[in-house]
Image (cartoon, grey):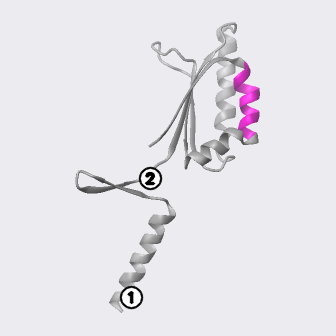
Amino acid sequence: MWQEKTISKFTKKMNYVFQIDFCYKMSDNHFSRGIFMTRHVIVWKIKPEYTEEQKNKIKADAKRELENLMGQIPGLQKIKISTKGLKSSNGDMMLDSLFDTEAALNAYTIHPSHVKVATTFVRPFMETRLCFDFEE
């Protein structure tokens, strides 16, 4: 009886580990475990022909619409738009988003809701876009 319960608990635990895609790696003779996710970071510079008032509206509209994508796109775990950088910043807006996988990020880029927001509220107003994607 004890062995059956122990084996059953072990099997459930292992199934759980595999279901959430844990990765194990050897580090300093210890096993460390972590969930690798994909982060997508973009910094935009708004075109110089807009006034400060226009830039503030562009940033507010883009922030609202991009953050409203949360819950609409599978695999998107977090999305935050920062529009109030410090004086040392040379960008006007930053997107920081987190996805389950790189495949989820790739699906996001072509998802109709994202494409609509990007083509309506972001791309027409931007001079520069820098992107950095990575796993963490």
Residue in the picture at 67% in, 45% down = 107
User: In this view of the protein, can residue 86 be seen by the observer?
Assistant: yes
Identity of the amino acid at label 2? Ile
Q: Which one is nearer the viewer's eye here, 117 or 136?
A: 136
Residue in the picture at 67% in, 27% down = 62
Q: Is residue 133 left or right of residue 122?
A: left
Give the Cα distance between marks 2 and 1.
30 Å
Identity of the amino acid at label 1? Glu
Q: Is residue 35 left or right of residue 78?
A: left
Q: Is residue 64 left or right of residue 134?
A: right
Q: Is residue 1 above or below residue 128?
A: below
Q: Which residues are magenta?
A: 113-124
Q: Secondary structure at mark 1?
A: helix
Which quarter of the picture shows residue 30? bottom left
Q: Is residue 100 left or right of residue 58?
A: left
Image quarter in which the N terminus is found? bottom left
Q: Which residue is mark 1?
A: 4
Q: Is residue 2 above or below residue 87?
A: below
In the rendered image, residue 61, in percent from the top left (x then y), is placed at 70, 26
In the rendered image, residue 9, in percent from the top left (x then y), is placed at 40, 78
Q: Which residue is mark 2?
A: 35
In the rendered image, residue 74, in percent from the top left (x then y), is placed at 65, 50
Q: Which residue is situated farthest in the left direction here?
A: 29
Magenta residues, dominant SS class: helix
Structural crowding at the residue carrying mark 2, measured as other residues with C-alpha within 10 Å and reported as few (<14), some (14–19) or many (≥20): few
Nearest to N terminus: mark 2 or mark 1: 1
